[in-house]
Amino acid sequence: MSYVIQENMSIERKLEILSDAAKYDVACTSSGVDRAGKKGSIGNTAKCGICHSFSADGRCISLLKILLTNECIFDCKYCLNRASNDNVRATFTPDEICKLTIEFYRRNYIEGLFLSSGILVSPDYTMGLLYETIYLLRTQYKFNGYIHVKGIPGASSELIERMGYLTDRMSVNLELPTGESLKKLAPHKNRANMLKPITQIRNGITDNKEKKNELVAMKKMHLSRNVSVPNFVPAGQSTQMIIGATPESDYQIITVAESLYNKYDMRRVFYSAYVPINEDKDLPALDVKPPLLREHRLYQADWLLRFYGFKANELLDEKKPDFNTLIDPKCDWAVRHLDKFPVEINRADYYTLLRVPGIGVKSARRIVSARRYGRIDFEHLKKMGVVLKRAVFFITCNGRMMYDIKLEENYILNNLISDEIRNIDKVSGDNYHQMSIFEYMKQGVG
Amino acid sequence: MENSRKLILNCEDSYDGILTAVYDAFNYRGRSVYITVDSEYNFELFAEYVEIRTDYDKSAKVINTIENKISKEALYMVYGVAISAERDKCNVILAFIMSGLKEGGSITKKLTNPYVQRCYDIRKKVSNEAHFYNEILRFEEIAGNVLCAKISPVANVMVSVMEHFTDRFPEENFLIYDDNRRICGVHQRSQRYFIRENVDLDELIYKWKEIRCDLSIDKSGGFSDSYTQLWKVFFDSISIKERENYKLQRNNLPLKYRKHITEFL
């Protein structure tokens, strides 16, 4: 690795290099925390998140996503910035990052800063630089907007804690779904080392919440006034895994995600379809396309875990370890559990409604509240946002199905797939052709 | 005979204008009253037209009545519908208020009432658009630390947009110009914002630069802000080539909204 200091590099060139190097990080959300603007400073945050633009790959741009430096002492095989790669290296000064953030923010290009970094000298040294930058941005530049910073595994716990009080979200990347894969592809990293800061941040958030609750209770009893507890990572922590670089099954991946949600109180787990950058015997070949559809299915399953009350082992198991890419995981589940259907809209409880394909969180809530005032029929469902195209196979209204439908696996599956082809087209960007029933039968789906 | 004729109240296309018409509509009880806004020059045969002059006392009375006799939520609803660009909005508001006065605060929950349903739909559309402009509005810096943005919303979302940016940038001077309505939101450092009507933005900026003796910037409307270029560089390099998907990009950010977005200019 070269330590050529590039003093003459223009800010434009640096931005080009260091945003290009940061683009494989998925998390670009600005949601999770509501903070009003403050006199004398710049910025506020919105709970729903605000995303400002969409890049040519269709992903949202919400934050100024950059690396502090793309120099790195580590040599992870999947990474663009690994030490053994010969590419142009650049490093921002803290001042440059602050100025860029503020000026982009003022023009409403971005919602805040997403700062990550290659490992310069040592994890501690790098974390120190990150801290210095964020401290400057919050104090001297009086930036009150959204900040997301990567926690560097191996950095001292004191630095991580201090960083937590300045940022809205922190994330430590798990990089790969299992420890074995990590050992193979990232020889300098290990799972235990990564879980340490994740655990620390989780504990910090829990303590912070408890303290806040205590304060609220004290204030109610008029015991203390004008005291406040500073926020610690108020928008929670997230992590990400690379999908398709290693042989893990979808079942393994969502099981890991589930335990991250349950044990570590993660706000989000992101999945990143592996884009081949480096040539290596342990990696997929360079001409392999990123598995975008698989990534899409994993995100759908992730939503089912977080909002729909599904468990990982309900969606998949050892016998069926991967999702059917032609159909979304919820439809897939429903078709394999036809004994639970049809569901009566006017009687079924909230969680049963949630399991019907075509009914989401919002429409399920609307159904539950609207049926108190009167009986619901199919025409009402449409207005409530239920996707009848999918739901008709699984529901009855007042004991009646909408059409004369056989509850038969192949028939329903065929209908659902022919509808899904268009969505697949959108996700993968390829042009899938309309599938004929003969092809479908040849593949033996289901 | 006279009373059976359709009566159409023609009012100004503003919140207060419409509420004034609602107030006057109550003077014509027993007749079939319709309200239109003056931007629609489509007159009907065999109908009686009455021009309504916006009267802030009358609209204030209506606002009070809605808040006290129906609910605050209902008032928000009426406001959301009034700033929309839907053709049937005035009559929806009138019908909504009438049923609200009959049924009280619970009216906002009665989605089976077609007018309430329509109110919800319109208001949702409007608030979506307002939020959308919080996302895609782009400022450019013109001389002397003043930020300037142009928007072309369908509904009149200026107030909501100004509220958002006033909270966000308390220490900035900025202008937001709606080129569909020729209105301009103005915020000065640490002050409350105001909205000016009938503004010619180019003229305004030119005059202002004259005062500051700063005419170096080209008159074509471009401001030559150096961060525009940096932003375009970032915008291009943050995209992953192997994942390029313009269909998805257009889905998320339709072409019709890109008129004033820096990175697409």
Image (spheres, rainbow, N blue to C red):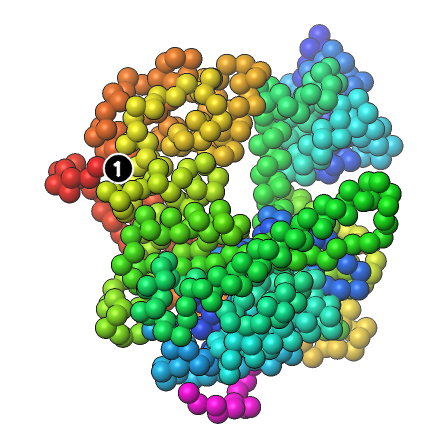
Point 32% across, 64% down: residue: A181
User: Taking the image as drawn, is residue A405 in sight?
Assistant: yes
Compared with B185, A365 (above or below) is: above
| Count of numbered badges drawn on the protein | 1
Instruction: Pinpoint residue A326: horizontal percent, then vertical percent.
Output: 27, 43
Instruction: Pinpoint residue A394: horizontal percent, then vertical percent.
Output: 35, 25
Q: Nearer the viewer, residue A368 or A230?
A: A230
Q: Nearer the viewer, residue A161 or A111?
A: A161
Compared with B73, A250 (above or below) is: below
Q: Disc 1 marks which residue?
A: A418
Q: Chief secondary structure of the magenta span?
A: loop
Three-letter amino acid code at disc 1? Ser
Point 51% across, 24% down: residue: A367
In the displayed image of the protein, which residue is found farthest to the top? B1
Check the residue under mark 1 and report the chain it is in: A
Left or right? Give the position of A382 relative to A235: left
Instruction: Pinpoint residue B145: horizontal percent, then vertical percent.
Output: 74, 71
Q: Nearer the viewer, residue B82 or A391?
A: A391
> Looking at the rendering, which quadrant does residue A337 occupy?
top left
Mark 1 falls on what kind of element?
helix
Instruction: Pinpoint residue A406: horizontal percent, then vertical percent.
Output: 25, 20
Left or right? Give the position of B170 relative to A112: right
Left or right? Give the position of B151 relative to A26: right
Q: Which residues are the magenta region?
A: A1-14
Compared with B26, B199 (above or below) is: below
Compared with A227, B84 (above or below) is: above
Left or right? Give the position of A314 relative to A127: left
> Looking at the rendering, which quadrant does residue A202 occupy?
bottom right
User: Taking the image as drawn, is residue B204 in sight?
Assistant: no
